[in-house]
Image: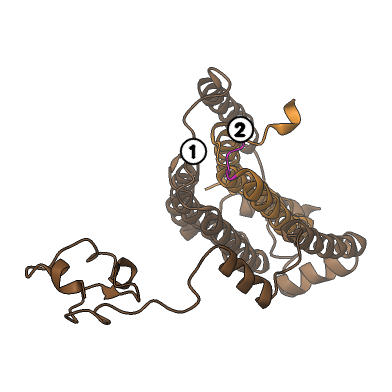
Amino acid sequence: MAAHLMAAQVLTHTRPGESAVFWVVGTLSVLAALGVVFSKNAVHAALALAGVMVSLAIFYAMQDAPFLAVVQVVVYAGAVMSLFLFVVMLIGVDSSDSLVETIRGQRLATGFFGVAFVALLVGVIGHTISHASAVGLASANAGGNVQAVARLIFTTYFWPFEIISALLIIAAMGAMVLAHRERTVPRPTQPELMRARFREGHPSAPHSGPGVFAAGDAADRPALLPTGAPDDASVYGELSGHRPVGDGSRENTP
Amino acid sequence: MNPANYLVLAAILFTIGAVGVLIRRNAIVVFMCIELMLNAANLTLVTFSRLRGALDGQVIAFFVMVVAAAEVVVGLAIIVTIFRTRRSASVDDANLLKY
């Protein structure tokens, strides 16, 4: 117990370099968190959230949790953020927020209660930590952080671990069921597609290119149909309706 | 620096996430703010793990990460399904259960 208390006395103040890293990365993480909330574009919000997650990974590494730091980068900044960006791209980047308040005065009340909540938490924690003592993880991490965490996971927390693995499988299947779209009509076959095209009156053969059977073969000269009428569909869209300099209307009539 | 300063930072991040959930209407951004709150809770767990000198907090933070990953998968699938039927990702538009 005495050794315990002595370690607590030693670790109340952290390593000298940690303070500087904490203030720099902490400021960055708060700015990035504000960016998540206040950026108009969902992609910018996702990038800011990735910044928060990477800075939290730095905090974990500083707090003697290298395993969690790596997991944070791999799972959060890697998998979860790419999933977020994927869905943002799927749904549309420009799905902007509506600026109409559905409940009147909600934003004002949210701001007020947010400031009050953070003041309450910071006040209580600040009051408590002024005489807090840290034990530190030097003895717990003596045989390596990964080994110590693994020992806990596979002994004390064995059943939660197993249940969480079942939860992961259930979640994956649930996502598959939710994202699966059932086909309500059978897929049309090729003959059915062909009959549908003819029923709508599409021509059976491709259109002729510009200038076929016409007096000239310029790109803006419409082809002539068997009836002798000019075929406007043979000319590229930008040029149709545009009459060439040497007026083609007379030459096009047979 | 007192290591418990991390707790203050986590409280600030949690509050920013909660404010974001309340004021944003885009379902994806609301979801990101929930992730922000989960991350702040994780930072609290890791800090308490260090303050108390026991690794249980780190193990539980690891479990929180796994549950958050599962939650993201299901939640984004729900958002995509709602977007498919309603052509909107706004939380105000999904009010069919109201009537």
Drawing shade for chain B: orange
| Dots 2, 1 in contact, CB < 8 A | no
* Residue A22, image x, y percentages: 49, 53
Q: CA distance from mark 2 to mark 1?
A: 10 Å
Q: Label 1: how many residues lie within 10 Å, few (<14), some (14-19) or many (20+)?
A: some
Q: Is residue A35 left or right of residue A211?
A: right
Can residue A228 be seen here? Answer: yes
Chain that bears disc 2: B
Q: Is residue A191 left or right of residue B13?
A: right
Q: Secondary structure at mark 2?
A: loop
- Report the predominant secondary structure element of the magenta stretch: loop
Q: Residue at x 35, y 79 (%)?
A: A208
Q: Is residue A165 left or right of residue B67?
A: right
Q: Nearer the viewer, residue A149 or A160?
A: A160
Badge 1 amino acid: Asp
Q: Is residue A231 magenta?
A: no
Q: Which residues are magenta?
A: B87-92
* Residue A85, image x, y percentages: 54, 59
* Residue A170, image x, y percentages: 84, 61
Q: Secondary structure at mark 1?
A: loop
Residue under label 1: A97
Residue A226 in which image quadrant: bottom left
Residue under label 2: B92
Q: Residue at x 58, y 57 (%)?
A: A87
Label for residue B51? Answer: none
Q: Can you name the residue that lies furthest to the top here?
A: A104
Respond whether the residues carrying marks 2 and 1 are from the same subunit: no
Q: Label 2: how many residues lie within 10 Å, few (<14), some (14-19) or many (20+)?
A: some
